[in-house]
Image: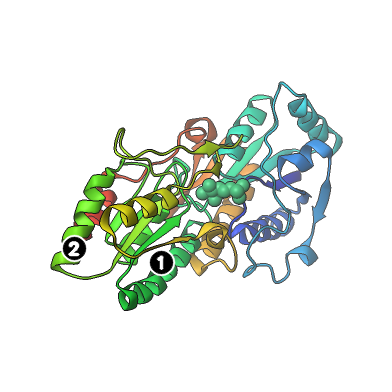
Amino acid sequence: MRIGLLTGGGDCPGLNAAIRAVVKQGTGEYGHTIIGFRNGWRGVVDGDVHPLGRQDIRNVLPVGGTLLGTARFHPRQEDGSMDAVLATVEAERLDALICIGGDGTLHAASRVAEAGVKIVAIPKTIDNDVEGTDLSIGFHTAVNIATEALDRVHTTAESHNRVMVVEVMGRHAGWIAVNAGIAGGAEVVLAPEEPFDIDQVVKFLRHRHRAHANFSIVVVAEGAVPREGSMEFTQQLGRFGEIVAGSVGERVSAEIAERTGFDTRLTVLGHVQRGGEPTPTDRILGSRFGVAAVDAVSAGTSGVMTALRGERVELVPLAEVAGRPKRVPEELLRVARVLA
Ligand code: F6P
């Protein structure tokens, strides 16, 4: 078989582990040919191919990012890019495509599958908001980085008697904020799942600083939103839903400083969360998903995504998971609340 492979959307640690597994399993056990595409769907549209062999995947396991490159670009019917994808699939004589990506890439994959191309997808996003899987590649590393940042901010907050506001990624869901907040012992966690009331946050911080300690850590997911009327705030979103202007962390930090008079500082973790070495968990997850995707393609399965369900890797229908961000469940939100 000739199998196309691409990584789309934002990069994350663990992608190279998945690419490596696809190449090893594909070229080894099955004797397939793996055709990589540079820069996600853009490379498929442009026919920008990078045939992948064993020499391409040497020493890539601990390396962050993606050796194939990626882009925030999704093929559409309207501008002819979907036709270009189909033309490349035919020109390269591909039997199937393996697409590694977050919601945008998976959504596009689902449309390409509907157009008749055999597709198996692998979920990745540090935000962990892909429906149907317990974990997406990259999330575990991001939580590690954010937790380490909170531990570091903690000591300086305590020394200076400050409120430290730490903004983490998570546009549609607060998985990083809630998990790192619990692991890093944050006093307040603000996530998109629960619109927050800035008055309550300020009241809580005043009480804590009077009664218990003279420092606090406030974790804010970049997609957290104030309850209507609680605080003025506008955000500007880009074409792919990414936040291009207006940081909620900045606003929250300014409101706390203004209303409490506490010495307050903001740290925006940003792309630090997406870079560098993947944790063993992300390397293992990427490897398992890569092997499972090749097995699925080889069995003639299409229109599915690899998913971690408890201890097992399973296949779930792509059409059921694309376009629905997975939210943090109430149980986990409650733990963050209880421990604040
Ligand atoms: O990949 C998801 C994500 O990390 C979001 O949490 C963040 O808002 C976005 O990507 C940033 O996108 P970009 O790298 O395109 O600025």
Total marks shown come to 2
Q: Residue furthest top?
A: 78
In the figure, is residue 80 to the left or right of 129? right
In front of the other: 265 or 63: 265
Asked if disc 1 and disc 2 are in contact, CB closer than 8 Å, the reply is: no
**Residue 288 x %, y %:** 55, 57
Q: CA distance from mark 1 to mark 2?
A: 22 Å
- Amino acid type, mark 2: Arg
Q: Which residue is mark 2?
A: 208
Q: Residue at x 44, y 64 (%)?
A: 146
**Residue 80 x %, y %:** 77, 24
Residue 177, labelled with which disc? none
- Where disc 2 sits, the SS reads helix
Q: Which residue is mark 1?
A: 147
- Amino acid type, mark 1: Thr
Q: Decide if residue 334 is in sight here.
A: no
Q: Quadrant of residue 96?
A: top right
**Residue 47 x %, y %:** 84, 40
Q: In the displayed structure, would residue 81 be above or below residue 55?
A: above
What is the crowding at mark 1: few (fewer than 14 residues within 10 Å), some, or many (at least 20)?
many
Q: Residue at x 82, y 52 (%)?
A: 50
In the figure, is residue 206 to the left or right of 196? left
- Where disc 1 sits, the SS reads helix
Q: Residue at x 71, y 22 (%)?
A: 77
Q: Quadrant of residue 241?
A: top right
Q: Earlier in the sequence, mark 1 or mark 2?
A: 1
